[in-house]
Image (cartoon, grey):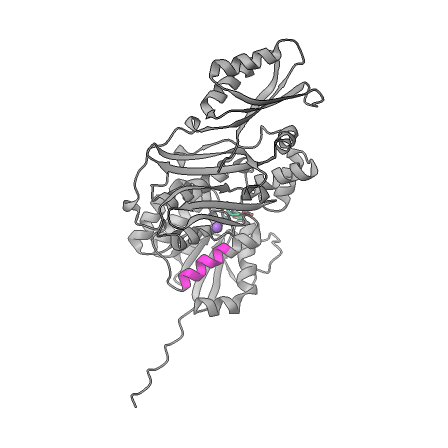
Amino acid sequence: MSPQPAPAAPRPPLRVALAGIGVVGGGVVRLLEANRDLIARRAGRAVEIVAISARDRQKDRGVDLSPYRWEDDMAALVEADDVDVVVEMVGGADGPALTLARQALGAGKALVTANKAMIAHHGLDLARIAEAQDRPLKYEAAVAGGIPVIKAIREGASANEIARVYGILNGTCNYILTLMEREGASFADALAAAQAEGYAEADPTFDVDGIDAAHKLSILAALCFGTRLDFDTVTAEGIRGLIAADIREAAALGHRVRLIGMAERDESGLYQHVQPCLVPADHPLAYVPGALNAVVAEGNFVGRLFFEGAGAGAGPTASAIVADIIDIARDEYGPAFAMPVDALDAAPAADARARVGKHYVRLIVEDRIGVLAEIATAMRDAGVSIESFIQRGDDAEGGVLIALVTHEGPGRAVAAALAALAASDHVIGTPMHMPILAL
Ligand SMILES: NC(=O)C1=CN([C@@H]2O[C@H](COP(=O)(O)OP(=O)(O)OC[C@H]3O[C@@H](n4cnc5c(N)ncnc54)[C@H](O)[C@@H]3O)[C@@H](O)[C@H]2O)C=CC1
Ligand SMILES: N[C@@H](CC=O)C(=O)O
Ligand code: NA
């Protein structure tokens, strides 16, 4: 009988350093502690926090950090010989987060980050450093928080050509829209509630102006289409211009309002746009409530994939970060954007305003003779055909509410009609228009 091979020596623990112990960092500490044994069994080795760093050592974060080495200077995490993985949870596209990320990868450490702003702006540069060092750059938490959508597209759907990806990519906006829809909450109250839950960015204008969703969309587009990540050509409109009446009118039309990021690649180029849309009430995206996110990806063999889950918050975001850490512990990783940076191709930006579809339009106007003729004239002059029209005299915004739905046409024409009307003395405030999703 041949001798049995000696059992393999247990692998040494994976040593992790955490930078930024806020909402997300606190969640990661709690998760690594709570599921320590299960994680070790799944990873094939222990995962140990060896050092942490944040701005304020004294701050009460509701988690006991005393077992871990504290570093006042994040650079010490990179310099330490006993750190294999640096987890960046500081935030910000540039500044200390980017410095840390570059230094960590440059020093041959693995990098895990939740920072979509940094990846959207500097993902290609960081991926190049990671490739040069043959170290992983992982960012599952950066897109749609806890939903494992990066892994699903990188791995599960990697055999497919993906021509379109779209969805609800900002939990704060979806939370606000849901609260306005269900409870008639004001925009300001709903935003304050989202901030209290820890969903919002340090600067919530990134959420409500669509910039955070644009960051995530640009990352998804690069991954789905194999194109060079191009945040600068993403166009974004947020939800500030919405009033409660828009939510009500959308409901009367059988729709819900959702902030949708959509990217498409076709012969005209790369389309990447974020804006509030009317979503038919029977569309899966209309059922996505609160801070949940959802992503739809259409593959040429697999068909339509729909992913839904928590897009923000301590637990879900920690779940995504620790999944990345486990992949690293297993040595399961590849190029950050599923192919080497030099294999990604460039696509020209497509004009978002050229997109054809039906639109919802809302104006508040003075209740006087001729105002409807003025609207009809502006629409005619811009080449916009009206499908349906409603006037409500009981609106509280200081005038009469006009809501209409256009026939199919380019968004550019609707924008031109509303620009003309915005200049009218009889139109109060800024008119609103939103495309009606038909997918
Ligand atoms: N909160 C959420 O639901 C999600 C957040 N993210 C991303 O995760 C990252 C962290 O977000 P949060 O935990 O919500 O932020 P946070 O503001 O709660 O925590 C940030 C942490 O970084 C530290 N920090 C900030 N600037 C620093 C500096 N200059 N030097 C040293 N430490 C510094 C702070 O002390 C704090 O511990 C961001 O990139 C965010 O976009 C991603 C998905 C979801
Ligand atoms: N502020 C973001 C948090 C996660 O990315 C959101 O609201 O979705
Ligand atoms: Na994710």
> Is 394 above or below relative to 96?
above
Q: What percent of the width, then of the height, locates residue 377?
A: 53, 12
Q: Nearer the viewer, residue 42 or 123?
A: 42
> Is 12 above or below relative to 139?
below
> Is 267 above or below relative to 142?
above
The residue lying at 52 percent from left, 69 percent from top is 37
Q: Quadrant of the N terminus?
A: bottom left
> Which secondary structure is most common in the magenta stretch?
helix
Say whether residue 93 is visible.
no
Q: What percent of the width, then of the height, locates residue 321?
A: 48, 55
> Is 74 above or below relative to 258?
below
The residue lying at 54 percent from left, 38 percent from top is 207
Q: Nearer the viewer, residue 325 or 389?
A: 389
Q: What percent of the width, then of the height, locates residue 385?
A: 51, 20
Q: What percent of the width, then of the height, locates residue 20?
A: 51, 51
* Region rendered in magenta: 320-329
User: Of all residues shown, which one is farthest toward the front?
Assistant: 387
Say whether residue 39 is visible.
yes
Residue 321 highlighted magenta (yes or no): yes
Residue 123 highlighted magenta (yes or no): no
The residue lying at 52 percent from left, 27 percent from top is 359
Q: Nearer the viewer, residue 50 or 255?
A: 255
